[in-house]
Image (cartoon, rainbow, N blue to C red):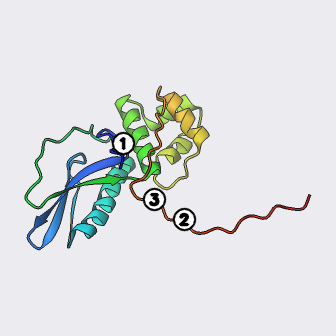
Amino acid sequence: GMKAEWGDPMQFHAIAYPDGRQYSVIFVDAPGCQTCADDLSSAKVMAQDAVEGWVEAHLVTGSALPAKKRSRRRLPRGGHWLTITIPLKIAVRAALVTRRVQMGLSQANMAARMKVTRQAYQQLESPDANLRLDTLTRAFDALDVSPLITLAPRETPVRRASRRPVRGGST
């Protein structure tokens, strides 16, 4: 499969390793984020929940995510590297908040730069709101950034529900 870049904002790297009767999971690029589970497959599920919660906690408090550093950490005996991909809507928000904080801008500053209300800007950073491309584009402009878009094949394809063909209307 395709290997993601270490700096990919959607991906986090963790080590799952046997720890007594369970697996412990520590993230090398999400300081303080850890979890545990009964077995390796459960550890992957728990790791997904843990890192999504870790990122969302940064969003809620308006804190920048720490810069990712390539780990020199060695795998413990019986350990496994895990790559956890967070959903696009969480990754985009995390990138916005991180850039805003790095630029020293408040939410009110961003709202003014985008010519929207502060409440409208806060929605953009809220984990629950639906992101609109035109609003995101205004946010990118306010942050003096351009998104880089790369579409990569998934390791495991999404299962799709079968759909009936749509019949054309009368002419």
Left or right of 28 on screen, residue 53:
right
Please tell me which residue is depicted at 24% across the width and 45% down the height of the picture: 29
Left or right of 149 on screen, residue 65:
left
Disc 1 and disc 2 in contact, CB within 8 angstroms: no
Q: Secondary structure at mark 2?
A: loop
The image shows residue 12 at horizontal and vertical percentages of 29, 49
Number of residues whose C-alpha sits closer than 10 Å to that of mark 2, classed few (under 14), some (14–19) or many (20 or more): few
- On the image, numbered disc 3 is attached to which residue? 157
Which image quarter holds the C terminus? bottom right
Disc 3 and disc 1 in contact, CB within 8 angstroms: no
First in sequence: mark 1 vs mark 2? 1
Q: Real-space Cα distance between discs 1 and 2?
A: 26 Å
Amino acid at pointer 3: Pro
Number of residues whose C-alpha sits closer than 10 Å to that of mark 1, classed few (under 14), some (14–19) or many (20 or more): some
Amino acid at pointer 2: Arg
- On the image, numbered disc 2 is attached to which residue? 160
Residue at the extreme top of the image, as rendered: 144
Q: Real-space Cα distance between discs 3 and 1?
A: 21 Å
Please tell me which residue is depicted at 56% across the width and 35% down the height of the picture: 137
Q: Nearer the viewer, residue 91 or 38?
A: 38
Q: Nearer the viewer, residue 93 or 88?
A: 88
Left or right of 23 on screen, residue 52:
right
- On the image, numbered disc 1 is attached to which residue? 9
Amino acid at pointer 1: Pro
The image shows residue 102 at horizontal and vertical percentages of 35, 31
Number of residues whose C-alpha sits closer than 10 Å to that of mark 3, classed few (under 14), some (14–19) or many (20 or more): few
Q: Real-space Cα distance between discs 3 and 2?
A: 9 Å
Q: Secondary structure at mark 3?
A: loop
